[in-house]
Image (cartoon, rainbow, N blue to C red):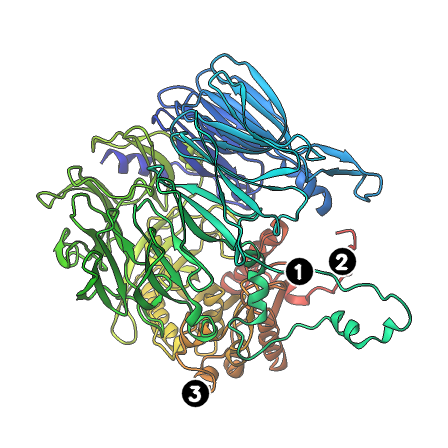
Amino acid sequence: MIWIAALGLATSVAAKPVTPDVVMNFASLKDPIISANGQTIAYVAQPDRGDPQGKLQRLGGNLFTLAGASKPMLSADGQFGLFELGPDLLTRENSKPKALKKLKSDRLLVDSQTGNKIRFERVKQAWFSHDGKVLVVLHEQPETVDKDKSNDGVQANAKQGSALTVRDLTTGSSRVISQVWQVAVAEDKFGIAYSTRSEDNSNNGIFKLTADLKSETIVQQAGFVSGALTFTDDAELLGFTWGKAEQAKRQRTHKVGLYQFDEDLRWQELNHADFIVSGYSELSFSDDNQRLFIGRQARRPEFSKAADYADNTALQDMQQLQRKSGLVLWHGDDSAIKTREQHQFKDEFKRQYFGVWQLQSDDFVQLADPQLAELKISENKRYVLGWSDKLYQQMVSWAGFYRDWYLVDMTNGERRLLVTQSLAADEPTLAADDSAVAWYVRGQLYWHNVARNHTNKVADGFANEDHDYPSPAPSYGFGPWLSGNNGVVVYDKYDAYQLKGGDLIPLTQGRERQTIHRVVIEDEEQQWHDVSQPLVLHSVSELNRNESLLRLVLATKTITPWQQHPAMIRFVAKAKQSEQALYRIERYDQFPDLHLANGNFGNLEQVTFMGEQLTDLDWGQAKLVNWRDNNGKSLQGVVITPPGWDGNTPLPTVIYFYRFMSDRLHRFPQMAFNHRPNFPWFSSQGYAIFLPDIRFEVGHPGRSTADALLPGVDHLVQLGITDRAKVGLQGHSWAGYQSAQLVTQTDAFAGVITGAPVANMTSAYTGIRLGSGLGRQFQYEAGQSRIGQSLYRAPELYIENSPVFHTEKVNTPMVIMFGDKDDAVPWQQGIELYLAMRRLSKPVVMLQYQDEPHHLKKYPNKLDYSIKMMEFFDHTLKGKAAPQWWLNGQPWRQPDPKE
């Protein structure tokens, strides 16, 4: 009751309207972290338009604000925070692209008790030692003068190391080591190692630091260079790769070295006909120090440029001419289309196939290869899961992503096929003791006994119940494994179950109350949950969207409430060495400040107070509404009403939607300008904002949008919230399509803004998503566009659901928005809709933002679009004078070539 009353007081005294300058200066809380001992927190206050402020707070102590600081790190003991100091916004905005790339960041070390600061310039990367007593700072490579270069004669030498500052944070003493190439810092015990690289490679080596920060040589050899460097968590072992510096990084072959104190170096030569350890190869140890995972690359021929023409005869050499052609050949049997190949080229160029060095037996076992390229490397002692999509790569274009999953034996590399044609989103889960694997595929839950090589079908009913796509329904996923052979947690829509040896044991009873339960995972690296300790559950009521934290005792299956709020509660982070954890609590009208849990299931203590920004602002309120669609199905939505609304005067209403929106009831609105209306700004200007849920029918997404949304508008009119003659519609991407399609079916809207819409499914079907290089056919046959058949099987459905074929029915003023470098929807779709509207003399304006992708990135464009949205709805919904751009357009202008 105290919490609710305080909230009401904060909003009741609000007076200042939300305006664009308020939005630009309103700070969001970003990047919250807590120290390993739970004594210190750090975060960033980031305005939408402006420089960040780093925040460092010793809990129960002072709060230090650090201008321009971001990306916080904390020492394990919480004594120090380290922040990045990047170039300020003014400098970045006034820098040309080449100059912008040259800008470097500093680091700021801050004492959390005294606020004392030390600045380190031009920093590439930094680390605290395991206990926070030592700071390691790798600086950017030095700049060298090269008169042959046109970029002001200054460049970084990419083939030599840079300065490393090592600072003892207890004594304040520092040492600087030159020509440092790579650094490794152990997580749990003192361990700092580094490699060096000189410009002529004459003095390269690998070294480690002693406790008094002196250097000891591990290996030193002229002409060689390290490619990877990594410690075990306890610093007992150091792994590294060592290769000839003269070779190109991709072709350079490396030995793998293993260093252990007071023992001779051990080496593995793993460069063979098929695979090499290259400059891109990565290393990682198992937590028990028994295995070193090594990524190798497939050998490739070196790239060679076509030679210059030697003489006049060569000018007509047909073979040489063909080698110089700019051909890209698309074959119908290619596993991936060429744009996808191009998009994946860099990743494929660096692709690693992992194997494992069994350190006790000294055996190396190759685990992955081009037939089974991907592994989920874990802390299991014998098995690892791996997957392949080779059989399904071609069908990605029209069916989406599928995989086959294997159980791989790390002792000999043998593979056991577990699952075929599983949705990419549904990953199997392997018990930490290698005893079992659980998975979901095609509506069915399975349990596999590894020792017996036996699989049981457990149950159905675990498919996503809200799945309305023309593809197999995914699952709700798995929770943590439970210690002592107690199985794994698995979810249906509402409840958590214990899956043990093929048996299902209910842990919650949420279905009757329409309450969703999930386990809060506090440590993603933890292999299992200790069943002697209670689980923390997070629950959400679908009836009112209120959220709770619960305490579940596994032995008795007893659940007791811990935190219950008419709000959203989100886990943020847990301290690694203590029980303290951070949560956010938020509502539409409550800022998502941080709250501290002390591990005793007591009250949450608020530890940040950025919500004070709301105390003098007009801020609306959000409520949940319920209605039935034209087919009798129950739907929900959120309606936001202006501050001070008397409840008696129907309001101009802007609808923003996508699919399910009712889960935003308690979500604090994003205080930023982007591709959607800014809710607080619109609310402060007297608008209601309606966020309706939409449920789709496969084959008829346009019609089902109308069936869901229009009765919702009717309901708001009946409640006296919405003025029927003053309803506007705004959507982006998928909702941009829905918006455009809706106004071909109804005249219920006074104005529509459609951002990045598909206007013609028949042409978009065979388009390309430029951001991923994927063909778009899968979106219609199996994905979001929900047609469910190919264009060639059901052309009538593509025509039915394409706005350009029904534009003659549109009587609603329309604004179309596109970035002309859209990486998801071909921006020519906007042109098709614009030309159709223009040809039929319909009221339309298209906003083309140059060099912008699917979501606007440049702030002037985001602000301009937001202002135009407000101006358009002010005109069409409130009857204000039309803006000049709507009345008269705007002539094309020559872009500034300097820009």
Say if 506 sits above or below 132 in the image: below
Amino acid of disc 3: Arg
Say if 194 sits above or below 662 in the image: above
| Helix, strand or loop under label 2 | loop
Amino acid of disc 2: Pro
Task: Give the spatial CA distance, label 1 vs label 2.
Answer: 10 Å
Direction from residue 259 to residue 579 in the image, left or right: left
Q: Nearer the viewer, mark 3 or mark 1?
A: 3
Give the percent coordinates (x, y) of residue 50.
Answer: 58, 38
Direction from residue 11 to residue 213 in the image, left or right: right
The disc, 3 or 1, on the residue closer to the chain's N-terminal end is 3
Furthest residue to the right?
A: 312
Q: Residue at x 15, y 48 (%)?
A: 486
How many tags in the picture?
A: 3
Amino acid of disc 1: Gln
Report if the CB atoms under discs 1 and 2 are less than 8 Å apart: yes
Q: Is residue 94 among what the camera can see? A: no
Say if 256 sits above or below 388 in the image: above
Furthest residue to the left?
A: 556
Q: Residue at x 72, y 70 (%)?
A: 326
| Helix, strand or loop under label 1 | loop
Kindly identify which residue carries mark 1.
850
The disc, 3 or 2, on the residue closer to the chain's N-terminal end is 3
Task: Give the spatial CA distance, label 3 vs label 1.
Answer: 37 Å
Along the viewing direction, whichever of 261 and 377 lies nearer the viewer: 261
Kindly identify which residue carries mark 2.
895
Kindly identify which residue carries mark 3.
793
Give the percent coordinates (x, y) of residue 612.
Answer: 42, 33
